Amino acid sequence: MTVRDRTKLDAESIVDFIADIFDRRGADSYLGEAVTMSEHMLQSAYLAEQVGADDSLVAAALLHDIGHYTSEFPPDAQDQGIDNRHDVAGAAVLAPYFPKRVTDCVRYHVPAKRYLCATDPGYFARLSEASVLTLKLQGGPMSPSEIEDFHKLANLDDILRVRIWDDAAKVAGRATPSFAHYAPLLQRMVDSHRTG
Ligand code: FE
């Protein structure tokens, strides 16, 4: 199988495809942060793994920022995320292969930050400088009616847990397992989503 064949993506090739993105693009800088994109995503996954989170949450933490790379996906997959921000676009390209619990955590990781800024006084103080800057562009803290709507999400607790790992996954030089460590977990999820 060639992972550079961008016209064909299926349950057999998606994990290698994502591995290839980590490989080629993982060294990209994570704007304004002290870690690269792959360091950030691997640190997120490792934080989830260290507290014994289940496979879905480890996968969600690992893939939450994949929407920064939707241009790597085949054109038909990209159409799903066209004109969308990286959170929505990322959920869209993962949706054929991963359960909704995973894609919800990806899809709502930016609103989760806006939610936590509005509801947890200590949260804003813990945000990185770059994250405070992007908060403005993302719409600032949620309004009361947005909070009310957010409370209706079935996977709210999971979404918030992934967000907290996301925020903590910006430590320069922290050692983590490599992507290869998580590939079997991802493939198990893809396989059970396909047959389930
Ligand atoms: Fe992130």
Image: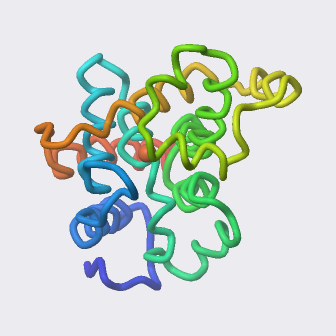
Residue 16, visible in the rendered structure: no
Residue 73: percent from left, percent from top:
47, 74
Image height of 4 relative to 179, above or below? below
- Asked if residue 86 lies left or right of residue 192, the reply is right
- Asked if residue 142 lies left or right of residue 58, the reply is right
User: Which residue is drawn at the image coordinates 30% and 66% (left, top)?
Assistant: 28
Quadrant of res 25: bottom left
Colouring scheme applied when the structure was drawn? rainbow
Q: How many marks?
A: 0
View extreme (right): residue: 145
Residue 97: percent from left, percent from top:
49, 54
- Asked if residue 149 lies left or right of residue 60, the reply is right
Quadrant occupied by the N terminus: bottom left
Quadrant of res 19: bottom left
User: Which residue is drawn at the image coordinates 29% and 18% (left, top)?
Assistant: 52
Residue 30, visible in the rendered structure: yes
User: Which residue is drawn at the image coordinates 36% and 57% (left, top)?
Assistant: 30
| In-front residue for pair 184/175 | 175
Residue 14: percent from left, percent from top:
38, 63
User: Which residue is drawn at the image coordinates 35% and 21% (left, top)?
Assistant: 53
Quarter of the image where ligand 1 sits: top left
Residue 61: percent from left, percent from top:
40, 38
